[in-house]
Image: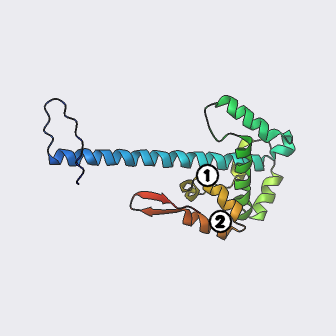
Amino acid sequence: MEKKPIIVNSHDVICDTEYSIWVDNLKQSYRNAQANAVLKTNFEKLKWYWNVGGELVTRKAEERWGSGVVEQVSLDLQAEFPNSKGLSADNLWAMKRWYSFYAEKFRDEKLVRCVQELYTSDSQIYNDAIVRFPDSFGLVPWGHHLDIIRLSSTLPEAIFYIKRRYRKAGNVLYYNAI
């Protein structure tokens, strides 16, 4: 049985085939916009997670402010953003592990030494020291990133899994399970 589109009539409108096709296209473009908004939100959140992990590493937060600093930062963030998810201490530790896993493999040892020599409280120095967020990481959900660093021991292995985590068919992005 063929499923016909449901069209709600209002006023004096001719709901012919051309109109139905046009409205179906509008609906599909709206669905695409919703999917793109989710992807953009995921990308920005992952980028923030990356930067938080980088801040914890490059600022040497535990050495500087004590062993409970990650838990305190979590409490401070949760107090400021009570309805936000992902601000737990466990998640902050995960951000640090995630960043550290790749930073150690992406960075040149000479760069790390130079940054350590320039160690200062200037925020810009810290931000320059953070390894840039790889845009392709924004296409993979956070939980998948955690699985990848847990299961991988080398950079090529992790990149292999990142590439396998998503595939594109037309304008639609599909995620693959591990």
The vertical placement of 62 against 105, above or below, is: above
**Quadrant location of the N terminus?**
bottom left
Observer-nearest of 106 and 45: 45
Residue receiving disc 2: 158
Indicate the position of residue 142 as horizontal and vertical percent values.
61, 51
Kindly identify the residue that appears in the image at 74 percent across and 33 percent down. 75
Q: Residues within 10 Å of mark 1 (few under 14, many from 20)?
A: many
User: What count of labels does the image hold?
Assistant: 2
Residue 122 shown left or right of residue 145 in the figure: right
**108, 34: nearer the viewer:** 34
Examine the image and state in which quarter residue 65 appears. Answer: top right
Q: Is residue 138 rendered to the left or right of residue 152?
A: left
- Looking at the rendered structure, the kind of residue marked 2 is Ala
Separation (CA) of disc 2 from disc 1:
14 Å
Q: Residues within 10 Å of mark 2 (few under 14, many from 20)?
A: many
Question: Residue 66 location in percent, x, y?
Answer: 86, 40
Indicate the position of residue 35 as horizontal and vertical percent values. 44, 48
Tell me, for residue 114, which label it has, or none.
none
Q: Which residue is mark 1?
A: 142
Q: Work out whether residue 64 or residue 34 is closer to the camera in this orientation and state it.
A: 34
From this viewpoint, is residue 39 visible? yes
| Circle 1: residue type | Trp
Which tag, 2 or 1, sits closer to the chain's start?
1
Secondary structure beneath dot 2 equals: helix
